[in-house]
Amino acid sequence: MHIRTAHLAGVALALAAPAQADTQINGLQQLMLFRSFIQDDAGCEASVVNGRAVITGRNAPSGAASCPDAFAWTQFVNAISDEFWTWGIDQTIWPAAPLPLCTATLTTNCCNPDAPIEPGNQPANCPVFRADYIPISPLPATPNGTPSRAVVGHNGLNEDDSVDPGRLLRDLELELVFRNRAMTDYIYRHDLYSREGLGSRNRAQNAALKDGNVGAAHALEVRFPLDAVMVKVDFIHQQIMLDRGLIREYGGPVPNNPDFPYLTVYLDGDGGEDQVPGFYYAVAMTNASKDLPSWHWYAMEHVANQGRCDYLGCNDSFGRTANGAAQPGANFGTHYVPPAIQFNDDKTEGNDPLFLTGGVYLPSETGEAITPALTALFEATGVGSAAEDPDPKVISVDDPAWKNYYLKGTQTGFNTVGGVPTGMGATVTEGGFVNSASCTTCHSQAAADLNGTTANAGVGATWRPNVLGYGQVAMGAPDMDWFYQMGLVDGGPGVVATQIDFVWGILNAACQSPAGSHGVCDSYPAAPTLSYGE
């Protein structure tokens, strides 16, 4: 059986709060019932077969659904083994100045997915899987903010930003999204890399409905293949990591956390504007694979991230066990680390206790310990097998820092079978709104209108601010009005926005021939490409 732990360092106040003999579970702890569901079936097993980590045993046919936590760990080690940092990234999959997709009548100055690859000549105007080219194209070094103390001090809350430290880092992060070959190839062949391709698909759906061809409208829906995988990594520049006290000089080759080192990489930049070269540190990952209709989602966080288990807690039924009774008044089991709570003598009943945010959930406080099953996956794949980082400048499979990333949680649908809206997010990736974050709901909104632009503004946003003023995001099942509109086509339903199967990378899509600066293209193909060659 696989279990997990709760972590609270810097939040030691919450776990180690003086417990009275008559301590009772409080209202806030009771509400964690809805955040602490056990995800994995009791019989979940994972093994490495022919070099690939897979779900084995009775749950093998439905691993992503019945063993989502174990499946997350198999996906994690497989992505590392495949060197995901060499995959396509949004900047190479959605070119800034795309050429049209080649057709039977358009054979020059166009993109041909079947054209021979010239390893030394990476095209600039067509989708690219970076591993196919030598030297591999560099990663961009364009963080959201400038790594300077002036920006680091902008938090507006207090000097250490203890209420929500993840939000500040979100404002300063370098976020890179890596997509595997299957995903890159689908985007390329289905003409989803430009606004013309996206817009023509929506127009064709409504044209088919106007002609009464409902089947053709369905045939134009976007469905990525089952082996499509994406890995989103949040990197923070070294100077910011130092300023925030997340790393320090300790005699190693580069500053780091000596007890729990972060994964590091040196980025020179890709030659574009606003590049900020230097060492970057991976603080969190949010990854997904198309093994389920709404994708299988999971978040990884570095164990020493401030606020790692705030608001949501941390939930892992496979990779780590936790001390479920570390927090006075409740026992959450070995799979769940509850969010830290401030215990005061006059606030121990009802729903009065408050979250204690911004602390560090270290294993010494949460009791988290790696399971034999996860240890076996690391050993069999060679992930994290080195005694120390072989080269801080590059990412490598054997870097032992991989073992310092803990599963925050998984998400496989919009609601539980009991109707509870599911949520999941990482403290940096969803900084400021992690308490309402939902990967599935947010990404379901990824859709393109007749102009190939994203129809749902805000990327999951709602009108509701949280108590700090940051916008909350949508949770639960999507609203059909996001995508369909009655009366749009001859008085009947039409597709106001074509879903692009949970892929927000379309935000990077540009026009082949822009019509001004407002995002509309000069023209849109009358017949969109279902798949190149068809």
Image: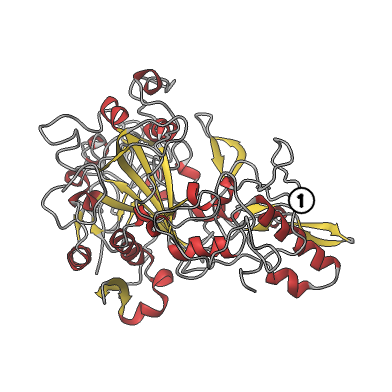
Q: Is residue 489 left or right of residue 422?
A: right
Q: Closer to the camera, 384 or 519?
A: 519
Q: What residue do we see at 39% from left, 48% from top?
A: 137
Residue 101 in the image, given as x and y percentages of width and height? 63, 60
SS assignment at label 1: loop
Q: Is residue 163 left or right of residue 98?
A: left
Q: Closer to the camera, 279 or 221?
A: 279
What colour scheme does the image use? secondary structure
Q: Which residue is mark 1?
A: 523
Q: Is residue 26 above or below residue 220?
A: above
Quadrant, the C terminus: bottom right
Q: Is residue 213 visible?
A: yes
> Residue 327, located in which quarter of the rendered image?
top left
Q: Residue furthest bottom?
A: 58
User: How many discs appear?
Assistant: 1
Q: Is residue 154 above or below residue 194?
A: above
Residue 285 in the image, given as x and y percentages of width and height? 37, 49
Q: Is residue 363 left or right of residue 178?
A: left
Instruction: Name the amino acid type tagged 1.
Output: Ser
> Residue 533, located in which quarter of the rendered image?
bottom right
Q: What residue do we see at 38% from left, 65% from top?
A: 68
Q: Is residue 44 visible?
A: no
